[in-house]
C-alpha cells in the first residue's frame, strides 16, 4: 500500500486492477483521506480489516490527527470490510440509507460467508458488516475543522446508495464506483441509465481532479469519465437492441463487437456478466 498525495490536504491509496483474493488481501479498490484541523475524514474503508489498519498506519505518517469521519460511497464488499476498524476507534460512519436494504439482506450475509472462505485469513469470523452511524437520504454539507465537504447522493446508479464527496476548497471529487479508470466497470445490478446521467452531474462540480473508486487519479475529468460512460452506453445499445428484438442473449453476445474494450483489465471476468445483467435490465425497461 502506497499513499499518494492528491492535493494539499488529500491523499489516496490505489487498489489493484484484479479480483479480490487471499494473495492480494482484497486490496482491489481505492480509499482516500482528507486532513483537517479537527480530524481526518476517510472516504471508503477498503476490503478487509487488515487493509484498514494499514491505511490507518499510513494516515499516522501524515498527521497525528484521529479519524473523525468515514464516508461510505456504497456498500460493496471491497469498500466496507474495513469499516469495523474505524468504528472501533470512534469514527462516525456516514452512508446513504438505501444501503440498509443490502446490509440486512441474505445477499450481504452470504457474500460475507463466502468471503470468509475465499479471502481467508484476511476475512474471518471476526469480520462484521458494519452499519453507518448517520444514515442520510439526500445531500449533506459536512463541516470538519472549518473544511467543507459536499456529500451528494447520486444513486440509484452503480448502486442504490451511491454517494460522492466534493472538497470545494481544493476542487477534488471522490467519485466512488461511478468512475472506473483503466479497467472494465463492474455493473452488477446497476441502473445504467441513471449511472450515465450521474456522470454528467459529476462534471458540474468543476473538479480539477477525481479520485475514482478503481484506478488512478483523473486530471482530465471529462475524458476519463468517458470510458465508463461509453462502455455503459454500448452495453445498453447492443443488449437493448437484442432484448427489444427478442434475440436470445447468447446469440446477441456472440454477435457483438467487443474489440474496443476487450484489452482492458478484467474484461474476461466481468464483461459477459455485465452484458447479461444489462440484457435483463433492458428487458425490464422495455426499450433499447
Image: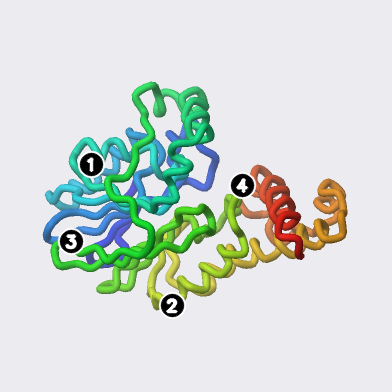
**Image disc number at residue 266:** 4
**Left or right of 55 in this view: 102:** right
Residue 218 image position (x, y, % from top left): 45, 66
Q: Earlier in the sequence, mark 1 or mark 4?
A: 1
Depth check: give the residue in front, 156 or 24: 156
Q: Is residue 22 visible?
A: no
Mark 3 or 1, which is nearer the eye? 3
Position of the N terminus by quadrant: top left
Mark 3 or 4, which is nearer the eye? 3
**Left or right of 215 in this view: 227:** right
With respect to residue 136, does 237 lie above or below?
Answer: below
With respect to residue 89, does 42 lie above or below?
Answer: below
Residues marked 2 and 4 touching at CB (< 8 Å):
no
- Which secondary structure, mark 2? loop
Q: Is residue 56 visible?
A: yes
Q: Earlier in the sequence, mark 1 or mark 2?
A: 1
Amino acid at each position: 500500500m502506497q499513499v499518494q498525495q492528491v492535493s494539499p490536504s488529500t491523499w489516496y491509496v490505489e487498489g489493484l486492477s484484479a479480483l479480490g483474493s487471499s494473495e492480494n488481501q482484497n486490496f482491489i479498490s481505492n480509499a482516500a483521506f482528507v486532513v483537517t484541523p479537527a480530524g481526518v475524514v476517510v472516504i471508503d474503508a477498503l476490503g478487509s480489516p487488515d487493509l484498514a489498519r494499514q491505511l490507518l498506519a499510513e494516515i499516522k505518517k501524515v498527521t497525528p490527527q484521529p479519524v473523525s469521519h468515514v464516508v461510505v460511497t456504497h456498500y460493496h464488499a471491497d469498500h466496507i470490510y474495513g469499516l469495523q476498524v474505524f468504528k472501533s476507534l470512534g469514527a462516525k460512519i456516514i452512508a446513504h440509507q438505501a444501503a440498509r436494504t443490502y446490509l440486512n439482506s441474505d445477499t450481504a450475509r452470504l457474500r460475507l460467508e463466502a468471503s470468509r472462505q475465499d479471502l481467508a485469513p484476511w476475512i474471518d469470523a471476526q469480520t462484521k458488516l458494519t452499519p453507518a452511524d448517520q444514515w442520510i437520504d439526500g445531500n449533506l454539507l459536512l463541516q470538519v475543522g472549518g473544511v467543507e465537504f459536499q456529500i451528494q447522493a447520486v444513486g440509484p446508479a452503480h448502486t442504490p446508495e451511491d454517494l460522492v464527496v466534493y472538497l470545494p476548497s481544493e476542487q477534488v471529487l471522490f467519485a466512488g464506483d461511478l468512475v472506473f479508470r483503466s479497467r472494465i466497470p463492474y455493473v452488477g445490478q446497476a441502473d445504467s441509465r441513471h449511472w450515465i446521467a450521474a456522470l454528467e452531474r459529476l462534471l458540474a462540480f468543476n473538479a480539477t481532479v477525481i479520485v475514482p473508486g478503481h484506478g488512478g487519479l483523473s486530471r482530465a475529468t471529462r475524458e476519463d469519465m468517458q470510458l465508463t460512460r461509453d462502455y455503459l452506453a454500448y452495453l445498453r445499445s447492443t443488449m437493448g437492441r437484442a432484448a427489444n428484438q427478442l434475440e436470445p442473449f447468447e446469440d446477441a453476445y456472440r454477435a457483438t463487437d467487443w474489440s474496443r474494450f476487450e484489452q482492458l483489465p478484467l474484461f474476461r471476468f466481468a464483461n459477459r456478466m455485465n452484458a447479461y445483467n444489462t440484457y435483463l435490465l433492458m428487458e425490464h425497461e422495455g426499450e433499447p
